[in-house]
Image (cartoon, helix red, strand yellow):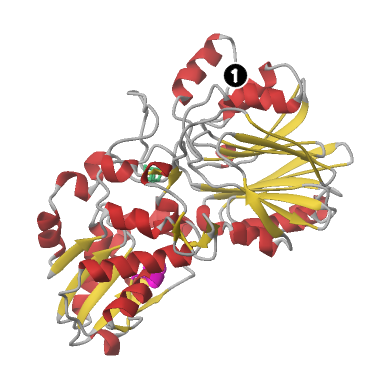
Amino acid sequence: MCGIIGIENNEDAAVLTAAGLLTLQHRGEESVGITLSGKGEMRTFKYMGLVSKIFNDEFLLKKLPAAAAVGHVRYTTSSKSSLVNAQPFQISCIHGNISVAHNGNITNFHEIKGMLLKSGAIFNHTSDTEILLHLIAMSKGDLADIVASSICKLDGAFSLVILRDKTLIGARDKNGFRPLVLGKTNDSYILSSETPAIEVMGGKYVRDIEPGEIIVIENGEIKKSFIYKSSKKQNTCIFEQVYFARPDSVMFKHTVKEARMKMGEYLALQMKDIKADIVMPVPDTGYYAAIGFSRISNILFENGFVRNYYVGRSFIKPMQNLRDLIARFKLRPIREVINGKEIVLIDDSIVRGTTSRRLINILKEAGSKKIHFALSCPPIIDSCYYGIDTPSKENLIAANNSIEEIRKYLDIDTLTFLTLENLIKSCSFCNGRDVKKKDDFCIGCFTGKYPTKIPNNIVKEEG
Ligand code: SF4
């Protein structure tokens, strides 16, 4: 999963893009990159680690008097985590200097890469995004047409920001798997994965980039916007609202926070026979669902975990062999809240099951009397090929075990998953009116049925 940003026609493009990326930090902690463009020059800065790495002497001293920028935060889903695969990718080709930042996974990557290799293309990265650069470099026409004809060849998930000189282009795949929104600040337009980054950059949300749309922006004006490939239905990733997006992000006219509260409310209705002393969230994604649960059930909301916010993914990765130790310092229980209590514990999902088991052990060590574990999505029974780092099917606990087997493995009193129907209802309301239908979402990891063809040779790498 990744976060992308673009801004044009703004002399503060460098700093604003960095600020926007900080707001999208939750979408990727492995690397950060910014391409700056101004006065006929283009330069890209990339670092491994958090966005804070960008605020260094190299970037601050060497930054161009940039008028436009694109930025990227990365969390590997399709290739090796290394600086060479950090984005944006900047190239120099017959069409000039071009920089691309991508969120999603291109599912026919191997097929297109094979064709490009046969025609003599040379690859520097192992990322799927590189094929797009080759397709752009080999096409003819004006930049918007080049982008359209190139991305028409791609399958899967891609939201893109592309920069050439002063021209900023945004594009979304025809299914609309990953979000991309348009904002405006004074004389500049902004493109972002999520709405809060637009606000941090001083702008206002204008609209979503539509699935299958390309938008071309220059000198503070929308020069062109068109649907390059239409689709009868869109398939926005429903898991963005369960887990990935920020709670203050606006998706489908409501905040993700509202959707998560609805998930909790529906869980409370599903579990109406459960009596407990407190309902508590697993920080942070279980937070609003637990509030929604408490509202409907009248069970007291309590925060029984303290999360250590200084433990990032980049710190955890090299220490995977110390998982138990990490679990201990990442979340600490407040014994006074937990001891002797019957608890409804709310988390977003169960993936492998190992993290949930460790959390439950922490609660038991803190003296919990009974644990009812509730998840704000259905069992994840298959992997994601569109940019979320779920493991391969054989490592998903719900793909290989019944709910009762999972309950026994976790050693808890009850286990409840939000039904798919209730998840869709939670993510598809606006002022009491349904704005989306079941078919408008991708629900592939809950059903094993994907909206696009998944090639047999696709490699699901462990993140
Ligand atoms: S398979 Fe799951 S995680 Fe992947 S895009 Fe679809 S809903 Fe989202």
Seen at 34% across and 70% down, the residue is 282
Amino acid carrying label 1: it is Ile
The reply, left or right, for residue 130 in relation to residue 200 is left
Residue that extends furthest to the right in the rendered view of this protein: 39
Q: Is residue 287 magenta?
A: yes
Which secondary structure, mark 1?
Answer: loop
Is residue 462 visible to us here?
Answer: yes
Seen at 56% across and 58% down, the residue is 25
- Counting from the top left corner in percent of width and height, residue 454 is at 36, 28
Dot 1: few (<14), some (14–19), or many (≥20) neighbours within 10 Å?
Answer: few
The reply, left or right, for residue 318 in relation to residue 124 is left
Quadrant (top left, top right, bottom left, bottom right) of the C terminus: top left
Seen at 45% across and 59% down, the residue is 433
Q: Nearer the viewer, residue 49 or 213?
A: 213
Q: Nearer the viewer, residue 336 or 388?
A: 388
Seen at 47% across and 71% down, the residue is 309
Is residue 134 visible to us here?
Answer: no
Residue under numbered circle 1: 122
Residue 159, compared with residue 187, is above or below; it is above
Residue that extends furthest to the top in the rendered view of this protein: 119
